[in-house]
Amino acid sequence: MVFDVWNNLKRGDIHPVYCLYGKETYLLQETAAKLRQAVVDEETKDFNYSVFDMEEVPLEQAVTDAETFPFMGERRLVVIKNPYFLTAEKKKEKIEHELSVLEAYLEKPAPYTILVLLAPYEKLDERKKITKLLKKKAAVVEAKELNPKETTDFTITLVKTEGKAITSEAAEQLVMLCGGSLSSLFQEVRKLSTYIGEREEIELADVNQLVARSLEQNIFELINQIVNRRRSEAMQMFYDLLKQNEEPIKILALISTQFRLILQTKYFAQQGYGQKQIASNLKVHPFRVKLAMDQARLFSEEELKQIVKELSTIDYEMKTGKKDKQLLLELFLLRLLGA
């Protein structure tokens, strides 16, 4: 796990070769940054820190650099970006890579260099000789997208690194407001930890007071109020959005997007797909799928199809100027709320 690497780096336990792969960009970048902090002195980074993009330069150039003695420092850090030769991806290669050079290096890595292969891919091709060798000789670490529970656990861990604690309710709300984005969570946790000062625990009230909601998050909360038939709360949220000068057509577009996601999630769930499979098929974050699944339980498939159809009609009427935009949206919400 990525977090194991972070803990090992704190203890000074550093492997000579790392292969970091996965689709969670934040975890990849943060792990690479922590390796840089652990390996290279800030004063000598210009001499002992190199990055090579495999879509632009040959692999041999990176390996040669890894074999070069550090200058004015004890260790070098060499990062190989986009090593697409580790995947099954078929693409027209602009650069010819001599993989045998890397294979030889893995058998006997330079004792003064930390070599990192940074692979932003969901999978590595385990049939390839180079991948098999990496799994034997290197620390191969997956930075996968976290599911909702893992994201909440990640948030709690982040708060602990700031010397604070957070209630489970506050952690879940923070994850929701950040849309499951790990980079956003990192920023908000630092802000909240500073905000509470001498207090030891971040509470739900702190999150609600300090973390700004995006329009998308406000729309999600609006739909949450709707599906739970909270008429006054839903309409108040809608009027607040209008007071903030949000365009009715933009609000409609986001409501339509969310209801389509709820419908698609319900369909796939009925086919026996799990959260991770649904997220992969729809190309959305697993956290959004979890929220959509919770909302989908409150509607039948036919109800959702009718809502999506009605939203499409309203969109047409708004864009053709047949009726007042605000009134169209207001009437739709009231119908949905059973008013």
Image (cartoon, rainbow, N blue to C red):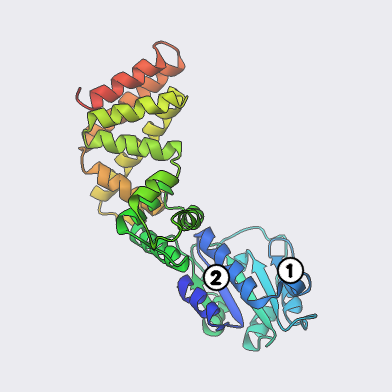
The vertical placement of 326 against 214, above or below, is above
Q: Is residue 73 left or right of residue 133?
A: right
The residue that appears at 52% across and 84% down in the rendered structure is: 136
Neighbor class of circle 2 (other Cα within 10 Å; few <14, some 14-19, many 20+) is many
Question: Would residue 61 be visible to someone looking at this image?
Answer: no
Horizontal and vertical percent position of residue 79: 66, 70
Residue 50 tag number: none
Report how many numbered discs are placed on residues in the image.
Answer: 2
The vertical placement of 311 against 106, above or below, is above
Residue 58 tag number: 1
The residue that appears at 65% across and 65% down in the rendered structure is: 81
Q: What residue type is labelled 2?
A: Leu
Give how far apart the Cα atoms at labels 2 and 1 are.
19 Å
Horizontal and vertical percent position of residue 133: 56, 82
Horizontal and vertical percent position of residue 246: 46, 26
The vertical placement of 77 against 283, above or below, is below
Q: Dots 2 and 1: beta carbons under 8 Å?
A: no
Question: Would residue 80 be visible to someone looking at this image?
Answer: yes
Specify the farthest residue to the front: 198
The residue that appears at 21% across and 33% down in the rendered structure is: 229
Residue 20 tag number: 2
**Nearer to the camera, 31 or 89:** 31
Q: What element carries label 1?
A: loop
The vertical placement of 335 against 98, above or below, is above
Q: What residue type is labelled 1?
A: Pro
Q: Which of marks 2 and 1 is nearer the N terminus?
A: 2
Neighbor class of circle 1 (other Cα within 10 Å; few <14, some 14-19, many 20+) is some
